[in-house]
Amino acid sequence: MTRVQDWQSRLQAVIAEYSDRSFVDGVSDCAMFSADAVLAMTGRDVAAGFRGYDTQAEGLDRLQSEGFRSHVDFVAAHFHESQSPRAGDLAVLTFGSEEATGVVQGRGVYMMGPRGLVLFPRSWIERSFEV
């Protein structure tokens, strides 16, 4: 996937926009934040067919109906895994039994969680994918 020339400023705009949002399934959760970042950086909406679910269970049902076990499985099917994440790449972090996706930026990973947009250290990255 190719990034647009001004991807850095576009990514910053998404991060700023999400900084003022509350967590809402299907609108402003970790998957939609990651998808919106990819859309801003590439012009490609990889999540077009999955937007607008009302609950995490509904989002998972939609993914599973398309043959994906989870949103991380979806990411793995659309992006190459990387051992050296760079700014703008997608990252997977694990919280107990839950996996969440976020976007690498600077020394951390931005991720949309129940309390809003949070910055986690890069050392928490379990997997990363090139955008």
Image (cartoon, rainbow, N blue to C red):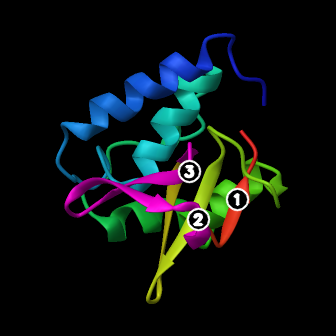
Q: Are marks 1 and 2 in contact (CB under 8 Å)?
A: yes
Q: Amino acid at mark 3?
A: Arg
* Residue 25 percent location from the top left of the image: 27, 55
Residue 112 shown in magenta: yes
- Residue on which the image places disc 3: 107
Q: CA distance from mark 1 to mark 3?
A: 14 Å
SS assignment for the magenta stretch, majority: strand
Q: Residue furthest top?
A: 5
Give the residues drawn in magenta, as a range: 104-124
Q: Residues within 10 Å of mark 1 (few under 14, many from 20)?
A: many
Query: Position of 3 compared to 62: left or right?
Result: right
Q: Amino acid at mark 1?
A: Ser
Query: Position of 52 compared to 81: left or right?
Result: left
- Give the mark, 1 or 2, whose residue is nearer the N terminus: 2
- Residue on which the image places disc 2: 92
Q: Are marks 3 and 2 in contact (CB under 8 Å)?
A: no
Q: CA distance from mark 3 to mark 2?
A: 15 Å
| Residue drawn at the location 25% of the way across and 39% of the way down | 19
Q: Quadrant of the C terminus?
A: top right
Residue 29 marker: none
Q: Residue furthest bottom?
A: 96
| Numbered disc 1: secondary structure | strand
Query: How many discs mark residues in the rendered view?
Result: 3
Is residue 66 visible in the rendered image? The answer is no
| Residue drawn at the location 51% of the way across and 34% of the way down | 37
